[in-house]
């Protein structure tokens, strides 16, 4: 989608940076996605004005975090993308609290906290993407989720059109799901973390990294797990039991290392990945009577 020049001029006045014809294939971990204009939200305080401007001008928009859990359609996209540029360092510690910008890298945040003897998030060390994306989906791995550590979140609230600060207790953090509205924009978070010796945290990080390296296709283009695990079950185990590792549609392929990771082994299109997802969902439904739910977020035209 192309932002009209009059809107571009107003965005510049509000401190935002407009980039034309951005390929989302270059901004997503799957390496799939069409082109559109991108708006970098460089000044948090003007976000409410920017959101009202887009609404008044009837410009559809979506917010892109780290791009690690999204499958984007191909071609010219009918929406613009909003993005928070990362700041440096974007985080600081006060006592047992870590204050982190939403655009900060999640793994880098875990390491930063560890250096200040704050643990509890070791399992998240290898989860790709931004802190904001982790908050939105309540990212978790190896028995760790980010939600229980959230004390406060500063965000643009779509329901009020203003920037607000919410307590962690005001938010429902469930398995790969939260109560945030789709158009909420995470800005900063305060994490309350337990004190732990640095060496002990590093030992936990090492264990998690070794597990991840041994079981996940870290050097291939993926969006992490495609499906959520059903209650009491494992999506990857069911897909594996059906002998579907290596099954492919075009260049969209089920990983040989982890059956719930679908990878782009060349120039896969969104349609290829969607067909592969639908094929697997149908086979699991037929074999197990279970309807798998997407963990990856799909942006269609």
Image (tube, rainbow, N blue to C red):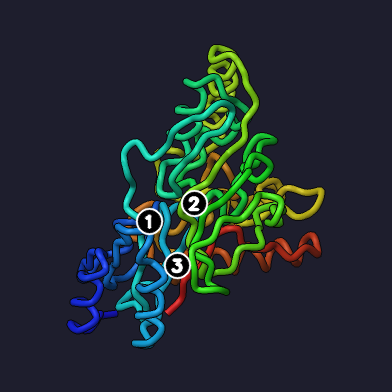
- Sort mark 2 into few (<14), some (14-19) or many (20+) by Cα contacts within 10 Å: many
The reply, left or right, for residue 110 in relation to residue 219 is right
Q: Which mark is residue 272?
A: 3
Q: Residue at x 57, y 24 (%)?
A: 118
Give residue 222's position: percent from left, percent from top. Answer: 45, 50
Image marks 1 and 3: residues in contact by CB distance under 8 Å: no
The reply to whether residue 150 is visible in this rendering is: yes
Q: CA distance from mark 3 to mark 2?
A: 28 Å
- Which quadrant of the rendered structure holds the C terminus? bottom left
The reply, left or right, for residue 88 in relation to residue 143 is left
Task: Specify the quadrant of the image occupied by residue 272.
Answer: bottom left
Which of pointers 1 and 3 lies earlier in the amino acid sequence?
Answer: 1
Q: Secondary structure at mark 2?
A: helix
Q: Residue at x 38, y 56 (%)?
A: 28
Image marks 1 and 2: residues in contact by CB distance under 8 Å: no
Q: Secondary structure at mark 1?
A: loop
1 is higher (above) or lower (below) than 254: below
Judge by depth and name the residue closer to the eye, 127 or 10: 10
Pointer 2 residue: 132
The reply, left or right, for residue 189 in relation to residue 56 is right
Which of pointers 3 and 2 lies earlier in the amino acid sequence?
Answer: 2
Judge by depth and name the residue closer to the eye, 251 or 156: 156
Pointer 1 residue: 28
Give residue 241's position: percent from left, percent from top. Answer: 70, 48
112 is higher (above) or lower (below) than 34: above
């Amino acid at each position: 989608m192309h932002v009209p020049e009059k809107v571009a001029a107003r965005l510049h006045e509000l401190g935002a940076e407009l980039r034309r014809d951005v390929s989302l294939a270059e901004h997503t971990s799957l390496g799939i996605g069409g082109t559109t204009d991108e708006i970098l939200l460089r000044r948090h305080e003007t976000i409410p004005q920017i959101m009202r401007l887009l609404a008044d001008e009837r410009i559809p928009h979506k917010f892109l975090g780290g791009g690690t859990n999204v499958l984007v359609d191909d071609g010219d996209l009918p929406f613009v993308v909003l993005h928070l540029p990362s700041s440096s360092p974007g985080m600081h510690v006060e006592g047992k609290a870590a204050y982190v910008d939403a655009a900060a890298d999640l793994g880098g945040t875990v390491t930063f906290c560890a250096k200040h003897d704050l643990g509890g998030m070791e399992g998240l060390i290898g989860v790709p993407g931004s802190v904001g994306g982790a908050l939105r989906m309540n990212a978790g791995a190896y028995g760790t989720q980010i939600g229980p550590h959230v004390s406060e979140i500063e965000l643009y609230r779509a329901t009020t059109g203003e920037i607000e600060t919410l307590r962690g207790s005001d938010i429902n953090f469930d398995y790969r799901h939260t109560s945030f509205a789709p158009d909420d924009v995470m800005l900063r978070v305060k994490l309350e973390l337990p004190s732990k010796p640095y060496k002990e945290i590093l030992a936990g990080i090492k264990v998690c990294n070794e597990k991840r390296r041994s079981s996940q296709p870290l050097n291939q283009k993926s969006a992490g797990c495609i499906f959520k695990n059903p209650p009491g079950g494992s999506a990857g185990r069911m897909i594996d039991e059906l002998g579907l590792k290596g099954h492919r549609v075009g260049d969209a392929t089920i990983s040989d290392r982890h059956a719930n990771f679908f990878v782009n082994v060349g120039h896969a299109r969104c349609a290829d990945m969607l067909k592969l997802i639908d094929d697997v969902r149908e086979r699991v439904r037929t074999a197990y009577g279970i309807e798998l739910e997407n963990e990856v977020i799909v942006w269609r035209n």
